[in-house]
Image (spheres, helix red, strand yellow):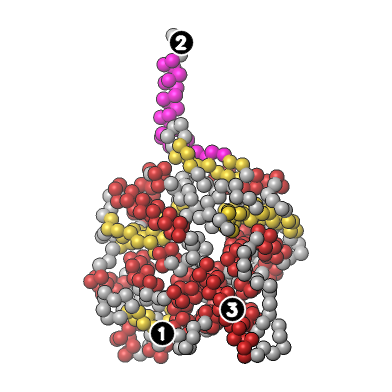
Amino acid sequence: MTEKMSQTEKHHQQNYTDDLFMNFGEKRLCDQKYYEDGKKLAFMVFNTLLTYSKCSLDNFDIGGSFGKKTDVIHPDLDLVVLVNNCEPPLDDILNHFQNILQENERTLQIIPNRYKQTELSLNFSFTNGITVDLIPAAKIEPHETKRVFKEMKHHKYAYFYNPSFVKDQIAFMDSQDAFTHTLIRLSKFWLKSLYLGESFSGGSAMMELIGVVAAQRERENKILSITRAFLKVLDIVKNLKSTKIAFKRLSNENLKKWSIIFPDKLSNNSKNIRELVPHVVGKPDILSRKCFMVDPANPFKDYLEDKTSSVLERLIGFAGITQHRIQMVLDGFRTFGKDILTVFEPIPGIEAIAETDNTVSFPKNILLALNDDDEFPVSVHIKAIVWKKRIYKNPKAVRAIDILKKNLLTVVHSTVKGVTGNVSSIEVKSAVFQLVGSSPDRINVKLEKSPNEQCWNYDVTILVPYVVKGATHTVGLSMTWDFDFPAVEDDDDEESNCCCTCTYTSLCGCFCYYCCLWPLRKCYKSCTCFKSKKFIYFIVFVLWLILYNAPK
């Protein structure tokens, strides 16, 4: 760093940093093929449901980061299916949809036996690696909005209606310009680099709203700066405990535009209640809160309502650390083209987590290996694979796996799409080694040039594919733990060992898939037909053929 930068030098450094952040933010978008494949499969799923469902289906939308084009790392596909006369709870509808999908897995290219249900959604994965959240939602006509809002004030299932506003949620983001979208992707990628120690639902949508407000504030300057705007995002995060954000839709229902409500108009008084409730802020008690962040499409959804004081404190502290990192870049600290890696380095580091969080147990040994050829059959749509030879029934180890997986994703993507110039696989390996190399001394870290038989002796392997110059590469962390109690073999979780990139049809007509064990690059066929009636019929048929053709 120079002792004192001149105005010209500061100007050049500002431009350099702006170019760096703008380039990185724009590169965060998934490739066009990911979107095309996702939309194609979503259309196939909806048509299948439309054909076989006993429910009256209207249409579907793709929501979430995928639908809003604010994704950062291969987003899940939020498939919102609008159902006429739909009322919560949704258990029966979700079970009904799952039965239909299971009967059509082969046509739809769905991986068998990986369905998970929540109160609101059905989760499953396609064989190309795209994960889906299928969400049934009540269809709400535009003229019904006022009536629905009145019902939601008293309806105990009000949160079930959030997906029903998916069109407005998408429209809100569509109304933002390219600068705002880039800023949002930077903000969401930053959030993914953090370990908050507890659940943080709605964080992605929250960062979208913060990005919109920060971009609006940046427009007060004659010349836009993505660096200044990102610093404004971090300023808002630092003041989350007193932040009040809400949006007002312009009166024309056909005009998809919103305006930001100034904080002084969000106090709890009779005038504001009359003007804002329920169309801007769903309930008067929201205005009484010290901080809130209201969804522009669903005024009853406050993204700060369920956030604990401890998680807000961590966010505030992490925002300050990141601001300091950015300021170092602005002040001229050179990191040899790796400024993005410096800014988005995971917070806190593994060593800090190990020292302060007793709910996490990191592995005793880590093997870092890189597959540097383009022969491994992994779909680039796959975000990450967690291969388990042995699964510990220990929540501390599970949390460690989640942390290392998230950090590995952040570091790989920061390197591949953040380093100035063409990145090499050596640079990726170096960045990942720095991630695990800063681990506590009690963790033994070993570096291998390529996967080998040693990986088979490790308990868990996390694999992240990435693309450089059109070629697919993979980097993986293999880990073992050293517990006093034995691990439990999990024979029922075979599918978690697979990357499932291709399918085949077995002799009995069942839809099955290949599984590729990354450490040994071995493939085997996994068929679940023995669990189906088709298999029984097939066996009976074979036995009949044998008996029929037997010598008399």
How far, Cα to Cα, is label 2 from label 3?
83 Å
Dot 1 and dot 3 residues touching (CB under 8 Å): no
Picture coordinates of residue 497, whole percent (x, y): 58, 47
Task: Answer with left or right where residue 242 lies relative to residue 375.
Answer: left
Residue at 40% x, 87% y: name it. Answer: 262
Mark in front: 2 vs 3: 3
Residue at 72% x, 53% y: name it. Answer: 448
Picture coordinates of residue 356, whole percent (x, y): 67, 71
328 lies above or below 418: below
Q: What element carries label 3?
A: helix
| Residue that mark 3 sits on | 17
Task: Answer with left or right where residue 508 lies relative to residue 401.
Answer: left
| Residue that mark 1 sits on | 288
The span shown in magenta is: 524-549
Mark in front: 1 vs 3: 3
* Pick the front one: 178 or 457: 178
Looking at marks 2 and 1 on the same chain, the residue that comes earlier in the sequence is marked by 1
How far, Cα to Cα, is label 2 from label 1?
88 Å
The quadrant the N terminus occupies is bottom right
Dot 2 and dot 3 residues touching (CB under 8 Å): no
Main secondary structure along the magenta-highlighted residues: helix
